[in-house]
Image: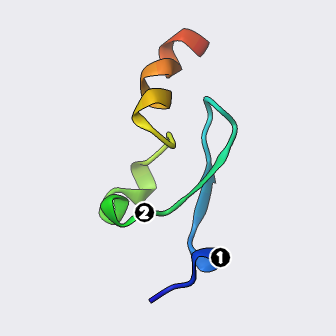
Amino acid sequence: MHKKSQLPEKQCPVCQRPFRWRRKWARDWPQVRYCSERCRRARRSIQ
């Protein structure tokens, strides 16, 4: 088991907040770009 401080982290391009790896993203971590569904939907309005 990993400590939370050792988990990989990315920055959301929409809200600019850092977010950490989650188990549900284990298979898709390289493709994950947004911290939440809300940011994923909001990406169109920002671009």
Q: How is the image coloured?
A: rainbow
Q: Nearer the viewer, residue 10 or 31?
A: 10
Q: Which residue is mark 2?
A: 22
Q: Position of residue 33 (x, y in %)?
A: 49, 42
Query: In the displayed image of the protein, which residue is found farthest to the bottom?
Result: 1
Q: Nearer the viewer, residue 31 or 9?
A: 9
Which residue is rendered at x = 51% and y = 43% of the image? 35
Q: Position of 4 compared to 34: left or right?
A: right
Which residue is rendered at x = 69% and y = 37% of the image? 16
User: At numbered mark 1, what does the secondary structure look like: helix, strand or loop?
Assistant: helix
User: At numbered mark 2, what does the secondary structure look like: helix, strand or loop?
Assistant: loop
Which residue is rendered at x = 54% and y = 10% of the image? 45
Amino acid carrying mark 2 in the image = Arg
Crowd class of label 1 (few under 14; some 14 to 19; many from 20; radius 10 Å): few
Q: Nearer the viewer, residue 30 or 3?
A: 3
In the depicted structure, whether residue 17 falls above or below residue 39: below
Q: Which residue is mark 1?
A: 5
Query: Where's the C terminus, which quadrant?
Result: top right
In the depicted structure, whether residue 25 falls above or below residue 45: below
Number of marks: 2
Amino acid carrying mark 1 in the image = Ser
Q: Identify the mark nearer the N-term, 1 or 2.
A: 1
Q: Which mark is residue 38?
A: none
Crowd class of label 2 (few under 14; some 14 to 19; many from 20; radius 10 Å): few
Q: Position of residue 42 (x, y in %)?
A: 50, 19
Q: Position of 37 compared to 12: left or right?
A: left
Query: In the displayed image of the protein, which residue is found farthest to the top?
Result: 45
The part of the image, by quadrant, that contains residue 24 is bottom left
Q: Position of residue 28 (x, y in %)?
A: 34, 56
Which residue is rendered at x = 61% and y = 61% of the image? 9
